[in-house]
Image (cartoon, rainbow, N blue to C red):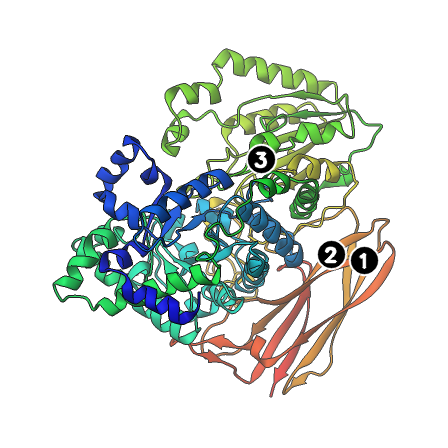
Amino acid sequence: MKQKELKALLDDMSLDEKIGQLVQLSGEFLQANDISYGPREKLGITKETVNLIGSVLNVAGAKATRKVQDMQMRVQPHHIPVLFMSDVIYGYKTVYPIPLGLGATWNPKLVENAFQKAANEASAAGIQVAYAPMIDVVHDARWGRVLESPGEDPYLNSVYAKSMVNGFQKKLGEKQGVVSCFKHYAAYGDVESGREYNTVDMSLSNLFQNYLPPYKAAVKAGAKMAMTSLASLNGVPSTADKWLLDTVLRREWGFKGIIISDYASIYELIKHGFAGNIEQAAKKAINAGVDIDMKSPCYAKGLKSLVTDGKLDEEKINQATWRILCLKNELGLFENPYFGISEEKESNKNVSLSNRKLARKLATESLVLLKNKNGALPLHKEEKAVLIGPYADNHQLLGMWAIHGNSQDTVSILEGMQKYNPDIKVAKGTDINRNRHLFEEMGFFSEKQIDQLVSAPEVEKENNQEALKLAAGADTVVLALGENSLESGEAGAKTNLCLPDNQLKLIKDISKLGKRIVVLVISGRPLVLTNIVDKVDAIIECWFPGTEGGNAIADVLFGKENPSGRLSMTFPYDVGQEPIYYNHFSTGRPYHGSQHKGRFVSKYLDAPVDPLYPFGYGLSYGKTKIKNIELSNKYFKQNGKVKVNLENTSDWDQKEVIQLYIHDKVAGLVQPVKRLIDFTKVDIKRHSEEEVSFEISPNQLAYFDNTGKEVVEKGEFDIFVGKNSMECLSTKLELI
């Protein structure tokens, strides 16, 4: 449709129709029977409003979306098509590792390919907008939603933001792919105490330097939609923050797309105490710049009276409606309201061999080898290995937010290992968790379901005995342990980050047998592994590895693949260290390097200051070392280079992640002890040496002041190059 025709359409729409375009409801409101009455009554929305909605939440599948599209266009006075939106966070039917695992690959190109394939699967099923990427910078593993983020670093998350948006939107012009809706704007990853839906409070310097860059990268990459945070930022709920949404996002960054609230967050302005009623909430949100109200009654019930009472200029509604119509027009929905919907493509593309191959590769590169004492891994054909644990023969490897994935498509760890050893013996050993109260708190389980998850005491005893008997006859015990998939993700905040007591008991009992023990950790967050690290020989962090998880894990266990994953989020020594992250600020009495000794430095009395495993850390089967750090020149005016030599001293070909950090030694504001500014993943052959170089420019040395302004100051900088954030070679440069 030409712009002139689109403008004529807007001018011809009634106020009710325009408001309808700003309302998003979920599929249960669209049932063609009395089932829909309950949700409408609960939300206080009329059938007339349902007929006019502009977008639909979480309806997927070629048949279902086509049916809903036909129905909605039939009852909409101008026959305007709806947009179908859904969570496609790390895959659609083919599920890739959780984003925290994707972050551990340090391979943005591979991640971009995965998001393109996920977009094609979702598009064939009728989804036009994906609520992703989630690029919140995360520092606190107590927060369950760290699962959805690439990690704790603003630069690394920015790189992934670009690759994820590009992957989703690459083929939009060919009626493939999906619109990318980045989230949660802004700084949702810093909720106090790691508790879901909590508040965020920080300086503007911290906000601009450490939290906003990934969102800005998504805008620069062309993301067409943004979702607000559920939290308040510095006292203002993000959903009604005009400075955040209009001044920064639209005016300073030039974002032209649609802003959508998170689920019911406009109504929650009342709960925040920022609005007194539905009308006030609607007015504050639309004045701030929120175009679409997701699953709340505020726009549907509040906007019209605000206009007719003269409290809101209708032009605000016109602007929001125009942005929505423009996106629909850009996707060609007025000519073809079905966009990429295809039952044939849906059938052929979903979980295809090609998609499985990519999922296997990504899962392999996401696995992080945390410990490998005396070369316990890889497993050798002549040793007798057994597989024990609640995740041994378990297909629940997708994680909480793979809502469209099917566990039946998932390769279990047992199935993966059987490809190498068809006769491998397996035992459950124990449940994933035996804490009934925890399952009750999750809110997804009935008593009957919990009975199926928590074995009776006599059954648990039998499982323990079977596992110990099996382990006693083995050389190596592979233990597949971890969290329940619903323990992490939204509303999955926890204060205990250890493996559950029943799993710890199983490890303790088996360790008494004197066998080699390899632990596979399935989790959606960094866990505290301090209480098991000395009892086992090897540990692999597997995350929730996705559809091909079992094959990827087996490939690494048996040495077909050399592990190359590196942590994108710090693993604490103790939960009391949280939030813990590598790029913390310098202090006057640092634990490392203070003029003071003993008690009066920044430390804990009962735990180390340093984490168990730092950001960027990970082992491989081979050994590499970095040496000979050199600068092209010590005094910089413009660009310069830093180079090192990477030597592979082992019999393994491998991938190594070389990381470049800086520290501004003297600045107008206190700066982090280290800050990542670049990285590269290098393929290096056995017994070989390569030169690795990085360009450094003055803008990479900039920081943000307390007005949010970027500042480049002359002076001395420490330059670090290493394989993780703690073990680096260093040199100095001076910006003149």
- In the rendered image, residue 402, in percent from the top left (x then y), is placed at 51, 40
Q: Residue at x 44, y 62 (%)?
A: 329
Disc number placed over residue 684 in the picture, else none:
1
Residue 553, compared with residue 425, is above or below; it is below
Question: Which quarter of the picture shows residue 373?
Answer: top right
Which residue ends up furthest to the left in the rendered image?
Answer: 309
Q: Mark 2 points at which residue?
A: 656
Are the residues at dot 1 and dot 2 in contact (C-beta closer than 8 Å)? yes
**Picture quarter containing residue 156?**
bottom right
Q: Residues within 10 Å of mark 2 (few under 14, many from 20)?
A: many
Q: In this view, does 412 lie to the left or right of 152?
A: right
* Marks 1 and 2, the one that precedes in the sequence: 2
Residue beneath disc 3: 397
Circles 3 and 1: CB atoms closer than 8 Å: no
Going by the numbered disc 2, the residue's amino acid type is: Glu
Name the mark on residue 45: none
User: For this rendering, which residue is in front, 117 or 700?
Assistant: 117
Query: In the structure shown, which secondary structural element does the residue marked by tag 1 occupy?
Result: strand
The span from disc 3 to disc 2 (Cα, nearest Å) is 27 Å
Tag 3, which secondary structure? loop
Q: In this image, 319 relative to 620: left or right?
A: left
In the image, residue 145 above or below residue 283:
above
Locate the N terminus by quadrant. bottom left
Using the image as rendered, state which of residue 630 and residue 381 is in the foreground: 381
